[in-house]
Amino acid sequence: MTENERKLNEMSTQLHNDYLDTTAGMADRVAKEVAKTRTQVIDLIGEYANKNDTISRARVNTLLRDLEQIEREIRDVAESALTGVIEESVDTAQSDVSEVFHKTLGLSLDFVLNAKVAESVILPGMSGERPTPKNLATYLAQRTGPDGLTLSSRVWQLAGDQRAEMGNVLRRGIIRGDTTSKMVREIKGVYDTESWKARRLAITESNTAYRTAIGYTAEKSKFVSALRLIPGFHHSEKCVSVAGQDRHGLGVGIFLPTDADIYNIHPNCTAYTQYILSEEVR
Ligand SMILES: [Zn+2]
């Protein structure tokens, strides 16, 4: 590592650590949006309650159908909160990479960030658009990931699972003749156990967006020749094994910015990349 690379990477590691601190808040935000829909379930239970505070078995199917509306609501709020955290992550990544190059080497990356996307391996569907946080977030939300899913299909899964769980709890409670307050408690339990899924999705999507935005800037910048992959702090097996590859004969853990798979190795991944400078600025 040259002196320039050392300075650059020290600062980018610091900024990445700061970013990771903010992702906890992002995950909270997404989870909170989903949690807000709980009051609608409670209202629904209230609407169906008899005088003796139970729900008539004859109404179980109608109640379960009404849960579909809440599922739609969960989808909407989760998708919009997630798109928000993706946009914020792109914004942070772009300002981090600009700051790092400017402060340590006096170099400006404006020529990448202000130019329209053209012939990018990382963002193939964004040709002709500017790589603004909003455009990039929209693109990342719409593209199909390595799991074969788009953001909205991941969100549909989340909302569908949660509705199925709530349906089970309510069906059981109604058939047993439970009080509505017992059912409300159990619904709260479902929200508590399911909220980790919303958090995990938020962490996965935001970190992927951060890495992708850095990767795109590296792909298009004449100052960067390669990236070093640093595994996340969980040291997941998958991450550590990818980081152990010498894919291009450039050294262990050294990738080209166009190796888009390194931006999304596994769910919950907190890996990041450091810069290998091109000859002219080393
Ligand atoms: Zn990882």
Image (cartoon, rainbow, N blue to C red):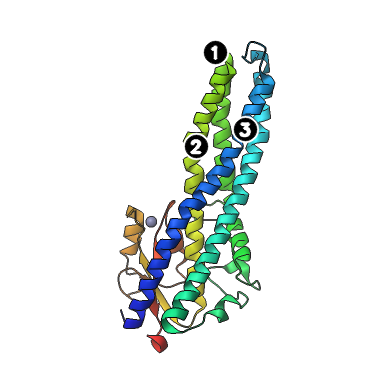
Amino acid carrying mark 1 in the image: Arg
Q: In screen coordinates, is 146 left or right of 167? A: left
The image quarter containing residue 129 is bottom right
Amino acid carrying mark 3 in the image: Thr
Please say if 80 is above or below 157: below
User: For mark 1, does the 10 Å Cα neighbourhood hold few (<14), some (14 to 19), or many (20 or more) residues?
Assistant: few
Amino acid carrying mark 2 in the image: Glu
Q: Nearer the viewer, residue 197 or 151?
A: 197
Q: Nearer the viewer, residue 26 or 222?
A: 26
Give percent across and percent down for residue 273.
40, 67
CA–CA distance between discs 2 and 1? Answer: 24 Å
Q: Nearer the viewer, residue 147 or 264?
A: 264
| Mark 1 or mark 3, earlier in chain | 3
Label drawn at residue 270 = none
Q: Which residue is mark 1?
A: 176
User: Please, what secondary structure does the residue beneath circle 3 have?
Assistant: helix
Give percent across and percent down for residue 48.
68, 20
Q: Which residue is mark 2?
A: 194
Q: How many marks?
A: 3
Q: Is residue 210 visible?
A: yes
Ligand 1 in which quarter: bottom left
Q: In screen coordinates, is 46 left or right of 98? A: right
| Mark 3 or mark 2, earlier in chain | 3
Q: Nearer the viewer, residue 12 or 146?
A: 12
Give percent across and percent down for residue 164.
56, 31
Question: Which quadrant is home to the C terminus?
Answer: bottom left
The image quarter containing residue 16 is bottom left
Q: Which residue is mark 3?
A: 39
Q: Is residue 273 visible?
A: no
User: Please, what secondary structure does the residue beneath circle 1 have?
Assistant: helix
